[in-house]
Image (cartoon, rainbow, N blue to C red):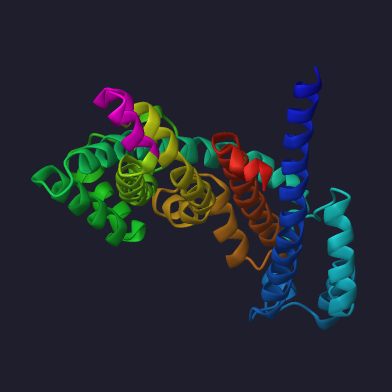
């Protein structure tokens, strides 16, 4: 009973400590996004009413949107609204920002999950083959693939995949998400770079673990190669890989902005671009804040997984 309470308290301390470290990061993101958007050239009132609008109409709309107030007052009101769950309304249609985001977020989550699954299915065998045959032809082939995956940008890969497999061969839809096959090309575009980076990290982490003291001791006691690679070394190699995976999970939503624009995927990335083009400040701030929250949550989850894998992290 006492041991269970002690372990539970340790995990609670780890969670509280991570949250305390991440809250200033979230506040910094909110502040930077707010300031950058208000420094972008362009007037949202002019974008809404057009250049031919009467000055009186412009001034009335500016007052209605509280854009006539000082920047500091707008910033205070925005921060208080975020803390109370009021993220404002869209300047274009007057709908709540959270309603817009809730309607588009599932599409992005589906695409991110598909890209993550693809990345893991590619990275795990590539990293294992490269580590198991380090210095051989299989290692060189796997690392060449990883280098190509990191080097090819998704804004080029997406249109090339669309041109070959959608336009020329007709295997997949060109755009949208009307059918399950529509997910294949966007998922490949978004997941290839992640697969490449994870496979390189898996290779180096697996090799380092296999040459570590614990694996050498296990081999001396007669442990089988299968147990060394997939139990002892895999657990040690998982820690840096999980940390990197947390970073890459956050970048999935950032990369989804370009991928969703290329494939007309109706998710948060496309919504962000549309809001930027229309100077819809509250909607842009909401979209970027959700992306930042996802990034922070992914890193928090990675920290907790590392603490579960390595007791030394929990004690620290």
Q: Is residue 221 above or below residue 69?
A: above
Q: Quadrant of the N terminus?
A: top right
- The picture quadrant where one finds residue 226 is top left
Image x and y of residue 262, in percent: 39, 54
Is residue 227 a member of the stretch shown in magenta? Answer: yes
Tell whether 36 sits left or right of 164: right
Image x and y of residue 176, in percent: 43, 41
Q: Is residue 143 above or below residue 28?
A: above
Q: Residue at x 64, y 78 (%)?
A: 40
Is residue 287 a member of the stretch shown in magenta? Answer: no
Q: Is residue 243 above or below residue 254?
A: above
Residue most toward the top? 1
For this rendering, which residue is in front, 309 or 258?
309
User: Does residue 215 show up?
Assistant: yes
- The picture quadrant where one finds residue 93 is bottom right
Magenta segment, prevailing SS (helix, strand or loop) = helix
Q: Residue at x 51, y 52 (%)?
A: 247
Tell whether 158 sits left or right of 61: left
Residue most toward the left? 137
Image x and y of residue 185, in percent: 33, 41
Q: Residue at x 48, y 41 (%)?
A: 112
Tell whether 200 sits left or right of 13: left
The number of numbered discs placed on residues in the rendered structure image is 0
Q: Residue at x 40, y 28 (%)?
A: 180
For this rendering, which residue is in front, 228 or 241?
228
- The picture quadrant where one finds residue 310 is top right
Image x and y of residue 127, in percent: 28, 41
For this rendering, which residue is in front, 151 or 234?
234
Please state the extent of the stretch shown in magenta in the rendering.
214-228
């Amino acid at each position: 009973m006492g041991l269970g309470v002690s372990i539970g308290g340790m995990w609670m301390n780890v969670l509280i400590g991570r949250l305390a470290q991440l809250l200033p990061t979230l506040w910094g993101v909110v502040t930077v996004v707010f300031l950058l958007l208000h420094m972008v050239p362009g007037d949202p009132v002019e974008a809404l009413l057009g250049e031919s609008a009467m000055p009186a109409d412009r001034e009335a709309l500016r007052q209605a949107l509280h854009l006539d107030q000082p920047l500091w007052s707008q910033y205070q009101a925005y921060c208080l609204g975020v803390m109370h769950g009021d993220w404002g309304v869209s300047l274009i249609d007057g709908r709540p920002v959270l309603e817009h985001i809730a309607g588009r977020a599932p599409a992005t989550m589906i695409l991110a999950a598909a890209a993550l699954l693809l990345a893991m299915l590619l990275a795990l065998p590539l990293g294992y083959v490269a580590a198991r045959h380090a210095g051989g032809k299989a290692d060189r082939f796997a690392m060449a693939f990883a280098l190509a995956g990191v080097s090819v940008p998704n804004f080029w890969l997406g249109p090339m995949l669309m041109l070959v497999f959608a336009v020329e061969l007709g295997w997949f839809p060109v755009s949208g998400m009307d059918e399950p096959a529509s997910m294949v090309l966007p998922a490949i575009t978004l997941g290839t770079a992640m697969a490449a980076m994870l496979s390189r990290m898996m290779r180096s982490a697996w090799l380092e673990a296999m040459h570590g003291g614990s694996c050498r001791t296990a081999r001396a006691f007669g442990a089988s190669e299968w147990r060394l690679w997939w139990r002892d070394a895999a657990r040690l190699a998982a820690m840096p890989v999980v940390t990197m995976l947390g970073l890459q999970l956050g970048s999935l939503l950032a990369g989804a902005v370009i991928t969703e624009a290329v494939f007309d995927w109706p998710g948060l990335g496309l919504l962000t671009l549309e809001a930027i083009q229309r100077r819809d400040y509250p909607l842009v701030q909401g979209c970027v804040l959700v992306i930042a929250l996802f990034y922070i949550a992914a890193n928090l989850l990675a920290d907790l997984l590392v603490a579960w894998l390595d007791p030394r992290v929990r004690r620290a």
